[in-house]
Image (spheres, rainbow, N blue to C red):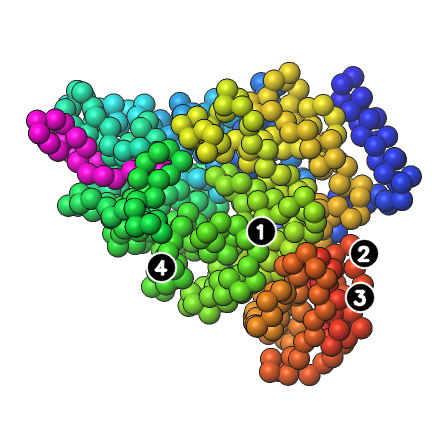
């Protein structure tokens, strides 16, 4: 009866929308024009759309308030209709859940909260039928302190795994024990934890409960390559390599330099620590050797392409280029964080975006860039927006993501405009980062709230009276069902632009060149296919209307007329290339004819 009531209530909401003048449309109508790439195609990942799912928050199927694998399987048709080529699942392995799965206690099984290995195999098989690949999150840098490997390693200094983790003797100062150096955890305070049994410190780049593995040990390497093979044998399409640049540290254990503020004194972070640089603990050259080995294991798969994606927060485009390796023998897709996560925080800076997108086109050896604006570790897309023109800013960001020459990675809920909803009280915080750093650091709960499927009380996420994180009140208007029946919704926009990315020759496989490169307000570029189809994309990055003109002769284009493909709802069509009007945060995509 509850399911029937939900259908009737949602149907009444759809009729109300229709009566108000918004004609309903089928969620699949536009997206069915595009088909997800088959993972048997060795180039399936190029220009693909990858959808990150935080499994706890996507769909609950067993009424416990926590999302699970069977819940994801039940929503595969929705993802196929949206045009998704692959799903990246954040960790679903057995775990104490201190860092919600990034602290792994068993690499070759499924946490019971999410289901069973049989559930995973069913998800993979059902996704495969829809030409959707499953990408596992492979956490290579560290394990849980509850992993049998660490328990054995910590038991003594002479066991078979004594050298599997980063152990170090203390530094003695005036007779007192201190950590070996000043390295800091990403999650606050010293990166060294004292172990009473071994009378040594162990290194943890992240939480105390996440000890770092010793990647100088060949046995550690072999164990992790075996984990990679295990999941390949279970049909995965690829791996997202978590914290991959952090595998190695300075063998001399030297102190890092401090990050200095304008006053010449060390900066202080949200946890009250002096901020240190990471030159000695991040992106050391040895990482590339491990990537080549991971690539060799992936390439041993017969009949299909298994891709490697890297979590790569890097300092320059040159560092990014190196992650692809010589002759593409390392990562397929290192994440280009320069575009979506610029240093200095989120801001729609035309010149900076133009620079970084152009660097991705010209500075990485012709490789395919991977752009991303959202993920489970950062505030959602609305960090770029104010209350005015919020949806328009969302359309701008999605246009940059899907109309560029790239593989696009999106986060669940982006397509309906889900916003960041941080906790307002410390007692409600689930993320240990927020507990440690409150109130300056509220943690990552705000970007991990449950998916909003419909306008009823549980948002279609779970029948449980209590969900693991609260469902934001925005679900009443921001949800899949309501937006399916509004032709001007964010969901409709995503469906259209993903379809274009897959079906239009210029937007799918064309070269990209920046236009009007001195314009301080409008970011614009040209996509041109090998057969000559040409598409113009223009995004106003200001709250003021802009009018722009384009001379494309330098790009070898001698046509002058524009045929509108997509534009911000309610916007005017341009009269010609000489007069393209853009409203506040307006978007225009047109074919040059």
Q: Which residue is mark 4?
A: 319
Q: Work out whether 228 lies above or below 306.
A: above
Q: Earlier in the sequence, mark 3 or mark 4?
A: 4
**Residue 330, position in %: x, y?**
36, 56
Q: What label sits on residue 49 in the rendered view?
A: 1
- Magenta span dominant secondary structure: loop
Q: Quadrant of the N terminus?
A: top right
Q: Earlier in the sequence, mark 2 or mark 1?
A: 1
Residue 65 pos. (x, y %): 59, 21
In the image, is residue 164 part of the stretch drawn in magenta?
A: yes
Residue ID at (71%, 54%): 496
In the image, what residue occupies the spot 63% across and 33% down? 451
* Magenta segment boundaries in residue numbering: 163-187
Q: Judge depth for marks 2 and 1 and give the one in front.
A: 2
Percent x, y of residue 411? 57, 43
Image coords of residue 6 (percent x, y): 78, 24
Q: Secondary structure at mark 2?
A: loop
Which mark sits nearer the N-terminus, 1 or 3? 1
Disc 2 designates what residue?
570
Nearest to the observer: residue 256 or residue 117: 256
The secondary element bearing badge 1 is classed as strand
Quadrant where the image shows the C terminus: bottom right
The secondary element bearing badge 3 is classed as loop
Give the alpha-carbon distance from disc 2 to disc 1, as whole Å: 27 Å
């Amino acid at each position: 009866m509850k399911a029937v009531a939900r259908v009737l209530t949602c149907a009444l909401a759809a009729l109300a929308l229709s009566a108000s003048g918004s004609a309903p449309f089928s969620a699949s109508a536009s997206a069915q024009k595009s088909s997800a790439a088959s993972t048997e195609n060795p180039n399936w990942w190029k220009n693909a759309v990858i959808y990150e799912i935080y499994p706890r928050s996507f769909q609950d199927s067993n009424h416990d308030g926590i999302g699970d694998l069977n819940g994801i399987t039940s929503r595969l048709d929705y993802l196929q209709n949206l045009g998704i080529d692959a799903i990246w699942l954040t960790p679903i392995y057995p775990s104490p859940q201190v860092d919600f799965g990034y602290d792994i206690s068993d690499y070759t099984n499924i946490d019971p909260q999410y289901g069973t290995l049989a559930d995973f195999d069913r998800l993979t098989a059902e996704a495969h039928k829809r030409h959707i690949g499953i990408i596992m999150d492979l956490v290579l840098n560290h394990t849980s302190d509850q992993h049998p490997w660490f328990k054995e390693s910590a038991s003594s200094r002479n066991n078979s795994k004594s050298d599997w983790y980063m152990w170090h003797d203390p530094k003695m100062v005036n007779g007192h024990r201190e950590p070996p150096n000043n390295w800091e955890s990403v999650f606050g305070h010293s990166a060294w934890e004292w172990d009473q049994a071994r009378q040594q410190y162990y290194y943890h780049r992240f939480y105390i409960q996440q000890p770092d593995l010793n990647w100088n040990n060949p046995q550690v390497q072999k164990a992790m390559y075996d984990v990679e093979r295990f999941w390949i044998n279970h049909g995965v399409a690829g791996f997202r390599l978590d914290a991959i640049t952090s595998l190695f540290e300075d063998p001399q254990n030297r102190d890092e330099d401090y990050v200095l503020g304008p006053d010449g004194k060390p900066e202080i972070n949200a946890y009250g620590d002096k901020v240190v640089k990471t030159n000695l603990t991040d992106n050391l050259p040895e990482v590339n050797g491990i990537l080549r080995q991971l690539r060799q294991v992936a390439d041993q798969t017969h009949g299909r392409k298994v891709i490697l994606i890297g979590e790569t927060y890097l300092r320059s485009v040159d560092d990014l280029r190196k992650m692809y390796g010589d002759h593409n023998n390392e990562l397929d897709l290192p994440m280009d964080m320069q575009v979506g996560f610029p240093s200095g925080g989120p801001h729609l800076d035309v010149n900076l975006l133009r620079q970084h997108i152009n660097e991705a086109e010209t500075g990485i050896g012709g490789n395919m860039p991977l752009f991303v604006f959202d993920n489970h570790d950062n505030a959602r897309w609305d960090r770029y927006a104010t209350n005015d023109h919020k949806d328009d800013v969302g359309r701008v960001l999605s246009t940059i993501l899907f109309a560029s020459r790239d593989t696009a990675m999106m986060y669940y809920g982006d397509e309906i405009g889900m916003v960041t909803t941080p906790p307002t009280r410390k007692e409600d915080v689930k993320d240990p980062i927020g507990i440690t750093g409150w109130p300056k650091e509220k943690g990552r709960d705000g970007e991990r709230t449950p998916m909003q499927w419909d306008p009823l009380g549980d948002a279609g996420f779970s029948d449980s009276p209590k969900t693991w994180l609260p469902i934001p009140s925005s679900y009443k208007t921001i949800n899949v069902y309501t937006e399916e029946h509004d032709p001007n919704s964010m969901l409709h926009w995503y469906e259209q632009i993903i379809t274009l990315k897959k079906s239009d020759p210029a937007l799918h496989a064309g070269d990209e060149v920046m236009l009007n490169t001195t314009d301080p307000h409008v970011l614009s570029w040209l996509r041109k296919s090998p057969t000559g189809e040409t598409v113009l994309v223009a995004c106003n990055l200001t709250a003021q209307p802009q009018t722009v003109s384009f001379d494309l002769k330098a790009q070898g284009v001698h046509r002058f007329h524009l045929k509108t493909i997509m534009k911000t709802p309610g916007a005017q069509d341009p009269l010609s290339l000489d007069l393209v009007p853009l409203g506040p945060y307006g978007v225009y995509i047109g074919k040059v004819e």
